[in-house]
Image: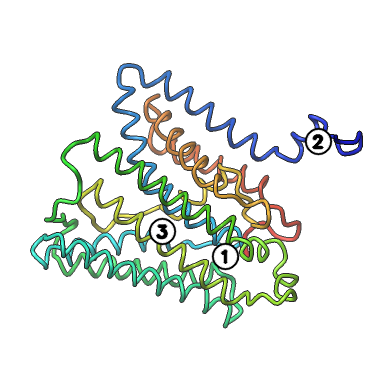
């Protein structure tokens, strides 16, 4: 039996779970609006939302490890663009075979792991904020993306291999399975392994975590590499949907992923209140919101304006550090 002192009042519960309540409320509201405005196109719109959310959700799930430390990576979009282009070029060079698809994915997976290791290690060794190294990678991949496209002599290229099931229903099932498998794996490592425990500890208090005997440098690198794996998988999922890539592929993904996470209740300062559910709740809220605004006939520029307002409002609310607004 709980004593009177141990009982939690509704007000206290709301106070301690205000971000979760707001996140789920936002998801419910956007879903209701989605049902209202979809009308007879409900089935089509649901498939569209799922396909749009699949890439975001998988990348956002990997980003949980980085954001739980209070860090961030603004090079995600450019990485996605380069990875997609490389996959197409390698696959096409191998005749569009299944072996070409496998080899191209392994190549971008290794590249993503190297980028993750670089981002995590260099920031620690040079004692730089994580955003500085990720900015370097963003400029590097921006240049690489432009150079790769210039080498083809076109603005976009398409993959010759068949990487998307002909049956739409089967394709949607494949996307759902991919999201579920990624979520289960990330949840396991985030909640039941040292990786999740230490990344949350670094976000809560890095000095204390290090004094407890944790090699924070090692776990920062591993966290960024785990994120890199999800970026590689997300890039492949995106390519199955579009079948092509170009100079603008991946543009804006870094900001979109950040908005997804904060909409899901992820504190940008990281810490023990970071959770995997933020990635899924925030992603579907974000995609549904975009779909709702588009269905309502809102101009694209106004949609971006609304996103900016939401981003500014939530970042000010969810940041838990008193001495800084942006992550380290």
Residue 256, image x, y percentages: 45, 48
| Residue at 54% over, 48% down | 261
Q: Is residue 17 above or below residue 138?
A: above
Instruction: Check whether the beta carbons of the residues at disc 2 and disc 1 lie within 8 A of each other.
Output: no
- Which comes sooner in the sequence, label 3 or label 1? 1
Secondary structure at badge 1 equals helix
Q: Which mark is residue 299?
A: none
Q: CA distance from mark 3 to mark 2?
A: 36 Å
Q: Is residue 231 left or right of residue 308?
A: left
Q: Is residue 277 above or below residue 102?
A: above
Residue 60, image x, y percentages: 47, 52
Q: CA distance from mark 2 to mark 1?
A: 31 Å
Q: Residue furthest front?
A: 1
- Which comes sooner in the sequence, label 2 or label 1? 2
Residue 121, image x, y percentages: 52, 78
| Residue at 13% over, 64% down | 153
Q: CA distance from mark 3 to mark 1?
A: 15 Å
Q: Which quarter of the figure is the C terminus placed in?
A: bottom right
Are there few (<14), some (14-19), or many (20+) residues within 10 Å of tag 3?
Answer: many
Instruction: Check whether the beta carbons of the residues at disc 3 and disc 1 lie within 8 A of each other.
Output: no
- Which comes sooner in the sequence, label 3 or label 2? 2
Q: How is the image coloured?
A: rainbow
Identify the residue under disc 2: 12
How many numbered marks appear?
Answer: 3
Identify the residue under disc 3: 230
| Residue at 18% over, 36% down | 167
Identify the residue under disc 1: 195
Camera-side residue of 237 and 305: 237
Q: Is residue 49 above or below residue 86?
A: above
Secondary structure at badge 3 equals helix
Secondary structure at badge 2 equals helix
| Residue at 40% over, 71% down | 113
């Amino acid at each position: 039996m709980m004593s009177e002192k141990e009982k939690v009042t509704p007000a206290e519960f709301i106070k301690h779970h205000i971000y979760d309540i707001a996140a789920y409320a936002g998801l419910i509201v956007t879903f209701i609006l989605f049902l209202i405005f979809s009308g007879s196109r409900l089935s089509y719109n649901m498939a569209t939302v799922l396909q749009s959310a699949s890439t975001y959700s998988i990348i956002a799930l990997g980003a949980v490890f980085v954001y739980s430390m209070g860090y961030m990576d603004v090079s995600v979009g450019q990485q996605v663009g380069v990875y997609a282009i490389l996959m197409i070029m390698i696959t096409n060079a191998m005749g569009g075979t299944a072996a070409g698809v496998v080899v191209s994915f392994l190549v971008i997976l290794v590249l993503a792991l190297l980028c993750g290791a670089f981002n995590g290690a260099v920031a620690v060794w040079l004692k730089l904020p994580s955003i500085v190294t990720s900015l370097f990678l963003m400029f590097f991949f921006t240049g690489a993306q432009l150079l790769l496209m210039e080498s083809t002599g076109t603005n976009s290229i398409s993959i010759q291999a068949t990487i998307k099931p002909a049956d739409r229903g089967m394709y949607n099932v494949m996307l759902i399975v991919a999201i579920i498998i990624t979520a289960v794996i990330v949840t396991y490592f985030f909640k039941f392994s040292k990786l999740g425990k230490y990344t949350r500890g670094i976000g809560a208090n890095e000095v204390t975590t290090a004094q407890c005997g944790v090699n924070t440098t090692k776990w920062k690198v591993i966290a960024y590499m785990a994120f890199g794996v999800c970026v590689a998988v997300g890039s492949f999922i995106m390519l199955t949907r579009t079948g092509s890539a170009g100079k603008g592929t991946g543009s804006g993904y870094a900001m979109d992923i950040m908005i997804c996470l904060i909409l899901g209740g992820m504190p940008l300062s990281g810490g023990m209140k970071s959770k995997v559910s933020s990635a899924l709740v925030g992603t579907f809220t974000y995609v549904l919101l975009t779909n709702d605004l588009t269905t309502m006939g809102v101009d694209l520029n106004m949609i971006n304006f609304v996103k900016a307002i939401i981003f500014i409002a939530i970042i000010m609310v969810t940041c838990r550090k008193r001495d800084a607004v942006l992550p380290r």
